[in-house]
């Protein structure tokens, strides 16, 4: 790869840039970002080499689209309008169904690979980029058969070089499942933060009492609203389903406490301890 | 301190033992545990020196009670029956109101200090003990005026030597606030784990899709039901209050999504990002 363009030089785009620089030292990395300060910061930090624009995209072998999912819906068709026939474009968004529908009939659909690397932190911007972020992480690829085989190969070589495992899935199933294991976690964390902040309004000093348990559970409430609002919008039906189930489980737990049925409270927790095995399986 | 007895040689009791060994190498550390295997393991691991029994307690300068809060309610009066007039006893439980009431009129009430070190992990047993666990952590002390001054000093010297900050509070306020910043986090995490496990019953492979965000949010669902059930029982009223508020916040978020009011969804998250400042304050 001679030229790579990263659209959105934040946490994910920037982390790809750092890994590409490490693995392919002769590649030039271009950046596009509607936040001028982020673009300058990314250059100053050495995350990217220089800025570029959409109408220069045909020079790139690879284009990575790492922007909020609502902007991807708008921009991806224009990106595909501007590339060369040998350019592979992939996005990294947390929703896949809408974006696949949007470009379904685009004449350059075969230059696009729908991807979702399961990696990140609660931080954002180029300063949040981390070398090696994708090592041993899962990358979910949707509708792989819609991408030209030779171009797939290019992207898969990169994913393999930076240490990712690949999982193939259809976009509908991706969006349904990711609602449970990612989107719901974010809402549970945001609402936990909100509940405690509301209490704190009157009693400012309760936070001395918070320990690492609270910190871990509420960590995702630091996440970027600009990134997450369009995800919840695009995955509305699935996310509402997970919220219904979560709220029902909380209500049930509360009812058990109200009835003084602490044997069942014990059993609820004991059976959920099974999550240990599952989390060991993730690693 | 010549002799210290740890009642309950698990994560918290064992971590106190390790720190005491480091800071006071000439102290002998005795252990009591109704789990014989844990007691043997604690000796084998060098966490404690030898086992002892309740009727030997009068030889100890310090007794640390680190057992589930329901067992503390039963055992603390018996412990206070068995000590010498120079023994200081403190517990480490996550509820303080019931335990203070239980020993309110005990003739040796002034030998007891009600404490709650805000420290721990989701693991349990002597193998979970960690040297330095309490460094820079908060220790909440309740009804300090009920403890004999000379005995307070002994305990405070230990807390200072192992790096803890002290916060004084009344037991009612402690139980009310800790429900928000600790007990609620555990339930939100357990119910998140349950919701995702229930989904997984039919679709076993969704866990490849889980990332570090899910892992962090669900971490507390690994916690011990034997420890947490009696905490929820003793703090029932406060915990139910926090659950009501949390469930209402989740329902409100869901309603905003149902109404397609994603501007408000954005604002909910943006205002909760304030948690960043708060968490920075913890550290």
Image (cartoon, coloured by chain):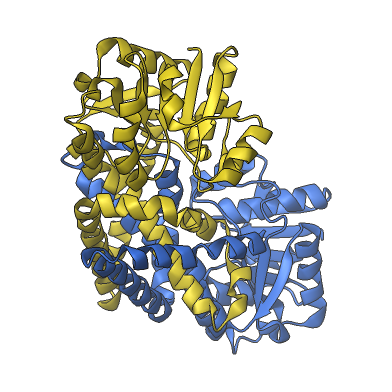
Chain colours: A yellow, B blue
Q: Which residue shows up at 46% across the image and 20% down it?
A: A163
Q: Where is residue A173 in the image (x, y as percent from the top left)?
A: 19, 38
Say above or below: A267 vs A92.
below
Residue B231 appears left or right of A278: right
Residue furthest bottom in the image = B105
Q: Which residue is drawn at 18% across and 37% down?
A: A101
Quadrant in which residue A282 is drawn: top left
- Within the image, what quadrant is residue A118 found in? top left
How many numbered marks does the figure carry?
0
Residue B137: % across, % down: 68, 60
Nearest the viewer among B245 and B72 is B245
Residue lying at 43% horizontally and 63% vertically, measured from the top left: B269
B38 in relation to B164, above or below: above
Task: Identify the residue shown where x is 45% and y is 41%.
Answer: B212
Q: Where is residue A90 in the image (x, y as percent from the top left)?
A: 35, 27
Is B152 positioned to the left or the right of A148 in the image? right
Question: Which quarter of the rendering shows the C terminus of chain B?
Answer: bottom right
Camera-side residue of A35 and A99: A35
Is residue B147 at all visible to an observer of this figure? yes
Image location (x, y in percent) of residue B1: 82, 61
In-front residue for pair A26/B16: A26
Q: Is residue A205 left or right of residue A146?
A: right
- From this view, report whether residue B276 is shown above or below residue A280: below
Asked if A87 appears above or below A124 in the picture, the reply is above
């Amino acid at each position: 790869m001679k030229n790579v363009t990263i659209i959105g030089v934040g946490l994910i785009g920037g982390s790809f840039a750092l890994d590409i620089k490490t693995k392919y030292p002769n590649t030039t990395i271009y950046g596009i970002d509607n936040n001028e300060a982020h673009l300058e910061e990314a250059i100053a930090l050495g995350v990217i080499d220089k800025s570029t624009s959409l109408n220069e995209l045909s020079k790139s072998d690879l284009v990575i689209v790492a922007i909020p999912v609502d902007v991807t819906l708008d921009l991806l068709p224009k990106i595909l309008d501007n590339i060369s026939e040998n350019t592979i474009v992939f996005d990294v968004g947390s929703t896949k169904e809408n974006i696949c529908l949007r470009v379904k009939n685009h004449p350059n659909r075969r230059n696009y690979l729908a991807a979702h690397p399961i990696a990140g932190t609660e931080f954002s911007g180029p300063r949040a980029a981390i070398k090696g972020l994708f090592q041993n992480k899962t990358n979910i690829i949707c509708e792989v058969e819609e991408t030209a085989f030779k171009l797939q190969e290019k992207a898969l070589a990169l994913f393999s070089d930076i240490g990712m495992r690949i999982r193939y899935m259809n976009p509908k199933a991706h969006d349904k499942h990711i609602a449970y294991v990612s989107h719901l976690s974010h809402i549970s964390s945001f609402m936990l933060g909100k509940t405690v902040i509301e209490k704190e309004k009157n009693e400012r000093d309760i936070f001395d009492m918070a320990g690492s348990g609270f910190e871990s559970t509420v960590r995702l409430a630091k996440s970027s609203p600009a990134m997450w609002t369009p995800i919840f919008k695009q995955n509305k039906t699935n996310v509402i389903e997970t919220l219904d189930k979560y709220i029902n489980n909380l209500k049930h737990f509360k009812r058990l406490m109200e009835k003084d049925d602490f044997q069942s409270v014990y059993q609820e927790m004991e059976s959920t301890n099974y999550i240990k095995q599952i989390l060991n399986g993730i690693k």
